[in-house]
Image (cartoon, rainbow, N blue to C red):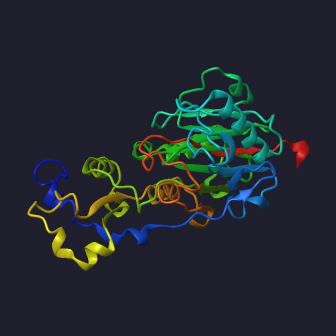
Amino acid sequence: MRSVRGKSSARVRGEGLERAAVEELFHSAPAPRMAANGVGLIAVPGWEKIPWLWHGFSTRLGGVSRAYCADDAAGELNLGFTADDSREAVTRNRSLLTQAVSGDEGTPLVAARQFHSNAVHIATAADAERERPWRADGLMTNEAGLLLGIQTADCIPVLVADRKRRAVGAFHAGWRGTVKRIVETGVGRMRLEFGSRPEDLVAAIGPGIAACCYAVGEEVLSEFESQFLYARELFREVYSTDAVRAKYPMLFLTQRAPGHSSIGPSLHVDLVEANRRQLLAAGLKPGSIQAVGGCTNCQRELFFSHRGSHGHAGRMMAAIGVRRKSRE
C-alpha cells in the first residue's frame, strides 16, 4: 500500500474507503432520564440490573451555569472548569451530578487533567481532595463510595464495569487517545490491578462527535494506518446531501484535482467503532459492548460540542462508581 503522505495522497485517499451520506452515519441519543434535581442523564440499558453499580452520561440539561446558554434560558450543567464559567457554578454542577448519579451530593468525585494520552490512574477517595488532579485519560477503581468522572465535549467517553470483582473504569478517547489505545490499555490495567477477566466485563461507549460530523484531515488517517490493520474500515468518504447541490450539481463543479476541492467529499472517522474494536481486542464479548448513540455536534440541544460551537463549549461527564455496600 502506498503512503497516504506526500503528493500521492490525493489519489489514494479514497482507495478502500466506503462512501456514505451524512444521514446514514447518524444515530440519535436516547431520551435522557431527568433526575429529581433536574439533571438530565443518559443511562446504559440493562446496567440498572447491576445492583452495586452507579453510572450515567451527563447532558447539558440541568445545572446552574449560564456561560453557554441564551440570556433567557435555564441554567446548564457545565462540569468543566473552563475559562468562561465560574468555579462556583461548576462546583455546584458537580454536586448536582453526584447527587443525580449516586443519590448523595457528598459522594466524592474524582476527575483527571486530561491530555489525550494513554495514561491510566488508579483512583481513591483521597484523590477527590487534590487541588490539582492527576494527569490521565483513564481512571479506574475498586473502592466503593466514589465516582470517577471523565470530561468530554466531542471526544468519546467509555465506561467499563467488572460484574464479578466490582471494579470500574472510565476512559477519554479522542482520536489521539484512540490511536494510543487508551481503552485497550485501560482494560489491560484492570486485568493487572484488579484481576478482571474480559468475559466478566461490560462496556458502554457514550455520546461524542459521530462519524456523520467528524471530518478530519488525511494526517489522521495516516496515524490510524500506522497502528491498526483495519484503519481504513473506520473511515468514510462523506458526501453532502444538500438539496440545492442535488438539484443543481453543475453549480458546484470545480477544476481542482480530486481530494482538493472544498466542496467535494470529506474524510470522516468513526471513533465509536474504533473504540468498540479496541474493546473486542481486549477480550470483551460483542454482546457486552453497547454504544448508547448520540452526536454532540448534531444534537447541541442535548450536548456541548467543542467543534460545533467553535471552542466556546462546556463539558459533559461520564460518571461511574461502585455503590457503598450499606446502600445495596
Residue 238 located left or right of residue 289: left
- Determine the residue positioned at 67% across, 44% down: 75
User: Is 102 above or below relative to 251?
Assistant: above
Measuring from the top left, give residue 316's x and y in whole percent: 59, 45
Say left or right for 273 vs 43. left
Q: Position of residue 309 (x, y in %)?
A: 45, 47
Q: Residue furthest left?
A: 255
Q: Nearer the viewer, residue 77 or 316?
A: 77
Question: How many numbered marks appear?
Answer: 0
Quadrant for the N terminus in the image: bottom left
Q: In the shown orientation, is residue 283 left or right of residue 210? A: right
> In the rendered image of this protein, does residue 279 appear above or below residue 92?
below
Q: Position of residue 36 (x, y in %)?
A: 81, 52
Which residue, as the protein is rendered here, is positioned at the far top? 131
* Furthest residue toward bottom: 247
Residue in view at x 27 percent, y 49 percent: 222
Q: Residue furthest right?
A: 326
Give x and y (percent) for residue 107. Answer: 79, 36
Tell me what residue is drawn at x 78 percent, y 57 percent: 50
State the residue in front, 317 or 244.
244
Q: Nearer the viewer, residue 186 or 262?
A: 262
Classify residue 324 by image quadrant. top right
Measuring 61% from the left and 55% from the top, which residue is drawn there?
A: 203
Is 184 on the left-hand or right-hand side of 221? right
